[in-house]
Amino acid sequence: MKAVGYLIGCLCILPLQTVGGQNYAVNTEAGLYGGASYYLGDINSRRQFYAPNLSFGMLVKHNFTPHHCLRANLYYGQLKGNDLDFKNDYQQFRSLSFETSLIEAHVGYEFNFLPYIINREHKTAYTPFLFFGIGYSVIVSSTVKDIEKGHLTIPFGIGYKYKFSPFISAGCEWGFRKTFTDRLDGVSNPGASEGDHLWHNNDWYSFVGIFVTFRIFEESFSCPAYKQPAVYK
């Protein structure tokens, strides 16, 4: 946990170290996302890409330097799980299952490892990136009777994007959502203590997919205190 906190702190400081005293062509891009969503929790405790279902949505990114941007997403996803998909005797005896659909909105920060921005003259055409933020999920439908209809999430993940032209970019991303509910699957874990409940005894879900974005706005600005600015091109 200390390592995660240190990483987040470093990433929050980075924009302050790179923005001052330069010219920038900030821009905004918007587009569509499509892929799969899946669940991790009491029924599926560790299997990645378990029972993937359709997910889709839209996203907006505001690039304020070649390394840093703000992002906002609105995603729809379907989650499901079934004890009978697992071989252990306890789950075979319990034989629980669920299906849930949700809509998630989140805002966050995205860090490009390489200097990348979608505009006319910037030369770097690709970069891996990471992101994190805060979100809120609303349950659209579910077979779980006492499920919480809305809950906070902490989204984070990694991705890769490529610029095909000064106006079009595409990429892929894999993100996790840490939730603050243990009723997403209709199963509570009675074995965890109260002190462990907030972080460990909760359900998770994930989105993995591809996206295409289009540049919709661009504006240049400069810092007057810097006499010889270096323009990102």
Image (tube, rainbow, N blue to C red):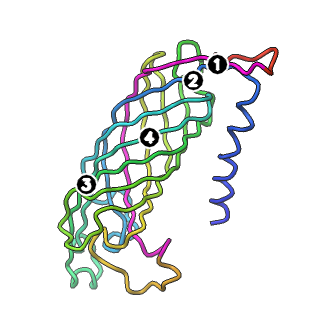
Q: CA distance from mark 4 to mark 3?
A: 20 Å
**Residue 220 counted in the magenta span:** yes
Query: Do residues under tags 1 and 3 come within 8 Å of each other at their CB atoms?
Result: no
Q: Quadrant of residue 84?
A: bottom left
Predominant SS of the magenta segment:
strand
* Tag in front: 4 or 3: 4
**Which badge, 4 or 3, is on the more N-terminal residue?**
4
Picture coordinates of residue 207 (x, y %)? 37, 50
Q: Callout 4, which amino acid?
A: Ala
Marks 1 and 4: in contact by CB < 8 Å? no
Judged from the image, the secondary structure of the residue bearing numbered disc 1 is: strand
Query: Viewed as shown, does residue 226 lie left or right of 128?
Result: right
Foreground tag (3 vs 2): 2
**Label 1 vs label 3, nearer the camera:** 1
Q: CA distance from mark 4 to mark 1?
A: 23 Å
Residue placed under numbered mark 2 in the picture: 26
70 falls in the magenta region: no
Asked whether 49 or 113 is in front, the reply is 113
Q: Give the position of the C terminus as an image quadrant.
A: top right
State yes or no: discs 2 and 1 in contact (Cβ < 8 Å).
yes
Residue positioned 38% across, 68% down in the render: 203
Residue 72 circle label: 4
The residue under label 1 is 221
- Residue pointed to by mark 3: 78
- Quadrant holding the N terminus: bottom right
Separation of marks 2 and 4 at Cα, in angstroms? 16 Å
Q: Amino acid at mark 2?
A: Val
Q: Which residues are magenta?
A: 198-224
Q: Within 10 Å of the Cα at label 1, are there few (<14), some (14-19), or many (20+) other Cα atoms?
A: few
Which element carries disc 4, helix, strand or loop? strand
